[in-house]
Image (cartoon, rainbow, N blue to C red):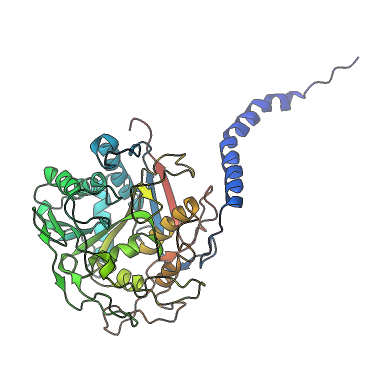
Amino acid sequence: MKTSTTPTPLRRALPALLAVLLAAAPAIQARAQQAQTSASQPQVKQCLAPMEPVGTPRGIMPGRVAWSHAPGAATWDGGEDFWFLDRYNDQSACDWLVRQTLCTLTGKDLAGDAWKAIFEHFNRRQGRGTRGYTAGERIAIKVNNNNTYSHDDSPEINASPHMVLALLKSLIEDAGVPQECITVAEPSRFITHSLYRKCKDSYPDVVFVDNQGGDGRQKATFKPDAMTYSADNGQLARGIATAFTDAKYVINMALLKGHVGQGVTLCGKNWYGTMSIHADWRKNFHNNFNQSRDGQPKYITFVDFMGHRDLGGKTVLWLIDALYGCKKVDGIPAPRWSMEPFRGQWPCSLLGSLDPVAIDMVGNDLLISQFPDMPDVNYSDMYLMEAAQANRPPSGTRYDPEGDGLPLPSLGVAEHWNNPVDRQYSGKGIELVYTVRQTGK
């Protein structure tokens, strides 16, 4: 009787084939879980189709967005303690997030070389020749402390003290910027004690500016009528904080979270806090902030902020602090993130880019993939569609935030990824580079 056997070449190939299948299993399972989850989730409507870029990519590597991920950097358990306490946040991991992001954006191995490349790139774009940072030039950092009411600490999500300290550390120690030339500013709200003391203890000469002043902070002042909105916006504030009008360079450090009315709040909306608005949000006007609910293109003020010479026009680096992230604009950080690669933990991430449109597109993709039921999330990419095509926006608006007769060019590239598992972009617009910190690094 003959015995059937597996041919020798195939038998030899089976271990390698099995290894490939085992390696692919997590990705296959993730796709299956994503498909099952997507079927039960509300479908978010957006202006742009996946992998169809519009606009002109910006940056040393045009359109690049660096996503640095340090699992375990944030470990708050949701209890009664404040989320920003030292025992829940790993400062060394936050330091790594900032430095890794800088290196990914520039292709450099050292953060000092990365800063040099960033400043040289910015000055070259400004027509100043190829030169880096010069001692004495002022840098303003716009943080998001929107959920503050005084200098007392608040349990709601705000700028992470550990992430701000990591940025200051890199600017001062890697880039060689003098402490006294750096201003951390939240002109519309308050710099709370936790953020102020964390940074002041290490770098006492850094300047802090907030709406109230006092307790070591400077009180914000504003240059009146510095903003000329490109369309009738009613009674929106027009003064821009002098921390920004007097600065040579700006860094926009936003948060990754949702927002009622606009769907998301990222770098584009973070500029609103530079304006001469009231510290009590109920006393402010929000004309032309919201997208149209039917997806019809319209003028949106965020584009004026993004292109204004004293705001987006001075910005050398855009960052989104995603150490925690949040579904809502207010309240404590919540919930933890279930999507890959977070697996029920906090995002523990930092996004960075030299393209103000690309970074908010990636932030938008992350938020709508994790929280498709966020309030007002439909068409939350409308301001980015307008900004990417600011020279010929779908709304037909002539964006000219200085009122000098010079309309804005494209402010960057807008495009959505294909899905939240593969996270692929077209290769002609956004380039998303993901780096994860290895345990023990």
The outermost residue toward the top is 1
Which of these two is toward me, 36 or 437? 36
* Residue 374 picture location, percent across and down: 46, 57
- Residue drawn where x is 41% and y is 45% of the image: 335
**Observer-nearest of 273 and 101:** 273
Single out the residue that lies furthest toward the bottom. Answer: 405
Q: Quadrant of residue 271?
A: bottom left
| Position in image of residue 392 (x %, y %) | 43, 78
The residue sitting at 56% across, 58% down in the picture is 43
Q: Nearer the viewer, residue 105 or 120?
A: 105
Residue 151 visible in rendering: yes
Judge whether residue 58 can be spotted in this image.
Answer: no
- Looking at the image, which residue is at 37% across and 75% down? 288
Question: Quick check: 269 left or right of 338?
Answer: left
Would you identify the image quadrant in which residue 220 lies?
Answer: bottom left
In the rendered image of this protein, does residue 334 appear above or below residue 22? below
